[in-house]
Image (spheres, grey):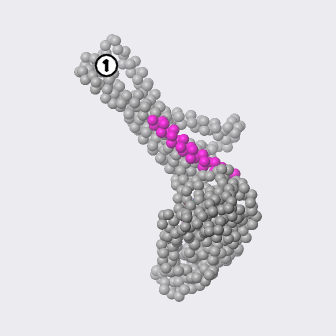
Amino acid sequence: MAQTTSPPATTPPPSRRRRGPARASAGIAAVIGLVSAGLALGVAQLVAAAVRPESAPVLAIGSAFIDRVPPWLKDTAIRLFGTNDKLVLLGSMALVIALLAALAGLAERWRRGAGLALVVLFGVVAVGAAVTRSGSGPWDAAPSVVGFAVGGVALRLLVERLRDADAAAERSTDRSAQPTGPAASSGSSARRGPSRRSVLTVTAWVAAAAAAAGAAGRALGTAARDAVAARAGLRLPPAASPASAVPAGVENGVAGTTPYLTPNADFYRIDTALTVPAIDPATWSLRIRGMVEQEVEVGFDELLAMDLVEERVTLTCVSNEVGGGLAGNATWLGLPVATLLERARPMAGADMVLSKSSDGFSASTPIEALTDPARGALLAVGMNGEPLPLEHGFPVRMVVPGLYGFVSATKWVVELEVTRFADATAYWTTRGWSDRGPIKTASRIDVPRGFAQVPQGTVAVGGVAWAQTRGITAVEVQVDDGEWQQATLAAEDGLDTWRQWSYAWDAAAAGTGPHTLRVRATDGTGAVQTSERAAPAPDGSSGWHSTTVTVV
Ligand SMILES: Nc1nc2c(c(=O)[nH]1)N[C@H]1C(S)=C(S)[C@@H](COP(=O)(O)O)O[C@H]1N2
Ligand SMILES: [Mo]
């Protein structure tokens, strides 16, 4: 708004009169930039605690920078700063971020959208850094995306409010500069719009929110970092009783069949945890209480010092549909649950152990499945030669052959309550699922995939079957409504693991067009897998898996 009349001699010239307030407004804009950046990083920190601590933008950019820094610069930095090099890096980053943030505030005040553009640019760099690190996935983008979106909105709204305040201040200055003008008479309504002070007040509130989000994120995230670091530094002791070698011939030789041992990274994951519990083994302990003669509490080191056992067990989820993939086979290292239960001496009448996790999940397991040394129920610490991955229960979980995970495989386990089925109820049981869950015999066709086109000739059909604790003694395949044919069983590893099978199908004889392949298994008791269809709830699906292919 330009000054159209010359001001009275008593008021300072406009340039001087305006410079003070303009400078104040620019200062506020810079502060808004800083606070918005703080909010972006605070929110991102909070989201990162849920996703993965390493995905927080500053850490991600710093790590990506370290990953990409040329060796000479890294060497120079280490020579100059020694082991403080990471501190120096983070300090420099903080400085750069602060400068950019203030600049974003000023830019947004200068021109709508200019500051936002800077925010978007920085956000893109952060997302890029977070998703390109090794072991990262698309979710690692979430902290930066959410953080910078919130920060950008804050910047926009606060600067807009500042604009309003500036405009209002200008109007009132103009009026006081022209006491005889027409507007002077409307005295009380001279100032319409927020004051700069109120802008600062709102900004202060946003700063407080940023600090709260950051602190909450840090508090949640530190635990995760500790757990990650502890896991990385952990060397598991060798098993006192190692698993036998995997027999030759456990794979069926049909390309495309699920691998016999499931790599940890591919192992299915099922749990109720929104954020993966991060437990530092140094603070972990397991308490055995309830109907016991002697309460027992063991720490992690104590547990590792006992005689550990290694065994292969195929885990299965009760939610697995017929033909589904919620099963995995791993080598587990752990302490037999029986060892600790013996110490605690369960009282007569106890028929269940309610295992509880740090995050409130619980599972009801028949006590005899845990005390029977032949069953081999473990408090597992190792999975396929590594400490348990955090998502699979680090530092300790239960593994009980023959029972679905929801009634046995408690991850992040911290307590075993010896009790009775009549007296206590597990997490899923209160939600309508069964209180017991022996695994039902199941078989699955992995190859060919459904709706595959196969050539006329011999087609290799292959898959897996499981009946943990009973073992698989036969698998049969049926084509359309033909006779059931014996499939060839791959070598058996143990009763607690799945077993691969194959079948050479004469697709030429079947003729071109669609055909249905069906599979069923027989377990070690001689029972043939039931054809009766059941949904997963309340105690596991049943029925024969079939797949339709077209011979071309
Ligand atoms: N703490 C906790 N443990 C849990 C669960 C859970 O939700 N929370 N889910 C159970 C279920 S339903 C299954 S099938 C297995 C899955 O183990 P995985 O994720 O290692 O494959 O964990 C079991 N242990
Ligand atoms: Mo499950």
Residue at 69% from the left image edge and 51% from the top image edge: 233
- What amino acid does circle 1 point to? Ser
Q: Position of residue 17 (x, y in %)?
A: 38, 19
Task: Tell me the quarter of the picture where residue 328 sits.
Answer: bottom right
Q: Main secondary structure of the magenta part?
A: helix
- Tell me if I can see residue 105 in this picture: no
Callout 1: few (<14), some (14-19), or many (20+) C-alpha neighbours within 10 Å? some
Inspect the magenta stretch and tell me whether residue 282 lies in it.
Answer: no
Classify residue 339 as left or right of residue 60: right
Inspect the magenta stretch and tell me whether residue 229 lies in it.
Answer: yes
Q: Position of residue 121 (x, y in %)?
A: 48, 42
In the picture as drawn, the residue positioned furthest to the bottom comes out as 483
Residue bearing mark 1: 176
Quick check: 99 above or below 533? above
Task: Tell me the quarter of the picture where residue 384 sits.
Answer: bottom right
In the picture as drawn, the residue positioned furthest to the right comes out as 240
Magenta stretch, residue numbers: 205-233
Q: Position of residue 184 (x, y in %)?
A: 26, 20
Residue at 51% from the left image edge and 40% from the top image edge: 212
Q: Position of residue 18 (x, y in %)?
A: 39, 21
Q: Nearer the viewer, residue 368 or 285?
A: 368
Residue at 71% from the left image edge and 62% from the top image edge: 343
Task: Tell me the quarter of the picture where residue 441 sits.
Answer: bottom right
Quick check: 352 above or below 126? below
Quick check: 52 above or below 181? below
